[in-house]
Amino acid sequence: MYDITVILAQLALIIVVARLAGLAAGKVGIPPVVGEIFAGVLLGPSLLGENISGHLFPLDTLPFLKLLASIGLVLFMFVVGLELDVSLVKGRGRVAASVSVLSIALPFAMGFGLALLLQDLRYPGADVVPFALFIGAAMSITAFPVLARILTDRRMNRTETGGLALACAATDDVLAWTMLAVVIGIAGGEGHGHGPDWVIYLAFPFVLFALFVVRPMLTRLTRMYRKAGELTPTILAIVLVGMLVFSAATEYLGVHYIFGAFLFGAILPHEDAAQLRHEILVRLEQISVILLLPVFFLVAGLDVNIRGLSGENLLQLLAILAVAIVGKYVGAYVGARSAGVPHWQANALGILMNTRGLTELVILAVGKELNLLSDELFTMMVVMALVTTVMTGPLLSFAYPRRRVARDIAEAERAALGDESVDRMLVLARNGQDNRVLLDLAVAALAGASPAEVVITDLSPQGRPLEVGSGMSLDLAEMAASMERQQVLVKRGEELGVPVRVIAHPSADVVQDLVELNAVLRPQGLVAWSDDPALDAVVAANESPVAVVPAGTPLPDADAAVVAHWSGEINGEAAVVLGARIALSRGTTLDLRGEGGRRLAAVRNTLAERGVRLAEPGADAGPLAAVPTELGSFTSSGTPGIRVRAELDAAPVDFAVVPLGAMVGA
């Protein structure tokens, strides 16, 4: 009989140690889930020894902890299925298929062969062939949730390489889990399920029933969510019931309950349901990540005893690591190269596909439950899972440095924009500001150029790295919200006759992304708010006019006059050009002021010839003004430039011009 007081104290200890270990791992650039797995190992006999660990977690409490761990596995596998998005494969099917097949086939074959050599490490009484099949399958797995998290944390999900990796991992997930289900059916199907032995043959019809009958019915959840505007208790209850029923069904069929949870997550609506899936994950993640999965790590860690490994076991561990790493890397690399992927990209794919993480631990726990793995082999396989996950970050930093990631992101955005000959203004929008002010200035600066376009960027800081499960759902939801905010600018661009494109996505380094984007786009001008934290870095890297508008500046009246102050110097001429462009764009008059006698009169005549309507001298000042102010000169690419100060609604606006001819010669 278990003591509830002891169990509650155990759960408190597990949560504290897991959170501390996860935070420590995150600080050094390791996925927090790896730290939490380490925490489970540390609470076991590997660090504390069997006596202390046994006193902390006595045998009579283990059944209750194992029950919680099983529920945690159900939730995790549901999340894995929910994160699986086969649409990632669109346009990349050939590469994804080539990489996935070879990155599964090669480590499977090598693992099968190694298992035959290490068959003494199987659980006493386990058959050799099922044991070898299981080891081969365990070597072939890639952890899609952890890989997705690594990609989004490094911003690689915005690159072609990241897209390929996600497509390959998604395909790998489908193939590997299908293969694993077959292997488990062979290894443990007979006598493992709760029904008669023949019921395992109903597993395949059950999958077809889920895909072609249940899946279409689940689309009603999307309609229910849109109607309610939020995730209601009823919708969440339907999801939980479906997850539990599917888990029970596959367990009854003799496959394993984790496959039912995975299958139900995979068939939930994906089309136009990003926000729904995200809210489901947010609700389930809290209890799963904070409580249930750490309990699973603890239960697994109690079976890991590194102290019990002998010298011979260490050699066997090295063989396991070699097969796991080489098999997965070479398979992915050769598969990518055979599909025409360049060396550097294939190298990155090989490193990424080696990520195993928590998914591997789930599979190993199943093997232990099916009495296929001895304690020594289970310990070595857990070490392999941790090593292959921890090594991903450092190796990826070497093979695919962050500077290249930022450049590839910018190149991808540039390629999406199309024609390089178009005159382009780049606008750095900010949430909470009236970005129509920036758009109007950008359209004015284009001065009727054709073809022309305005690119709106709305890069939001990426949220905290999540331990498991959430993958990209939060990023996708934030991107959708940002795109929705920018639709008003797209429509205003249509009204002004200038196409507006939107680049909106979460970013782990907004400043670096904007600098790289500016360098690749090479816009004819940049417009930003004065409180933009990326402003200084972008202006320093810019080789085109930059207009900086004070935060909070409202949209002026349509008929507001424009005042331009001319000083007879280069910066005064630039101020006049800016004022004239604003006046022409808004269809209003330009009040040209300054001292210069004949020279000022000549400027007035030139502007009049170009169609600028000039106000009579001495008229009341309008709310829009372009005022030259000496702020020092600077040089960019060897071309001298100047800075002038303009005023918009009596608020200062810095306007940098590089080169000068881009404005004055217009």
Image (cartoon, rainbow, N blue to C red):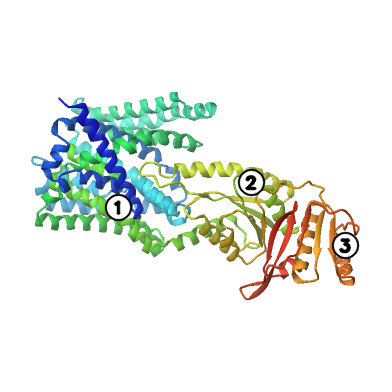
Q: Are marks 3 and 2 in contact (CB under 8 Å)?
A: no
Query: Local crowd at mark 3 within 10 Å, few (<14), some, or many (≥20)?
Result: few
Q: Are marks 2 and 1 in contact (CB under 8 Å)?
A: no
| Residue pictured at 18% horizontal, 28% vertical | 197
Question: Does 65 appear above or below 381?
Answer: above
- Labels 3 and 1: the sequence-earlier one: 1
The residue carrying mark 2 is 433
- Local SS, label 3: helix
Residue farthest toward the bottom in the current orientation of the protein: 638
- Labels 2 and 1: the sequence-earlier one: 1
- Labels 3 and 2: the sequence-earlier one: 2
Q: Are marks 3 and 1 in contact (CB under 8 Å)?
A: no
Residue 125 image point, x, y percent: 8, 40
Q: Which three-letter amino acid code belongs to the residue tagged 3?
A: Ala
| Residue pictured at 13% horizontal, 37% vertical | 55
Whether residue 588 is visible, yes or no, is: yes
> What's the CA distance linking mark 2 and mark 1?
42 Å
Residue 389, label in figure: 1
When asked about the image quadrant of residue 348, the answer is bottom left
> What's the CA distance linking mark 3 and mark 2?
35 Å
| Residue pictured at 54% horizontal, 51% vertical | 459
Whether residue 76 is visible, yes or no, is: no
Left or right position of 183 against 95: left
Of tags 2 and 1, which is closer to the observer?
2
Residue closer to the observer: 450 or 392: 392
> What's the CA distance linking mark 3 and mark 1?
69 Å
Residue 510 image point, x, y percent: 52, 55
Query: Local crowd at mark 2 within 10 Å, few (<14), some, or many (≥20)?
Result: some
Q: Which three-letter amino acid code belongs to the residue tagged 1?
A: Thr
Query: Which quarter of the figure is the N terminus placed in?
Result: top left
Left or right position of 319 against 24: left
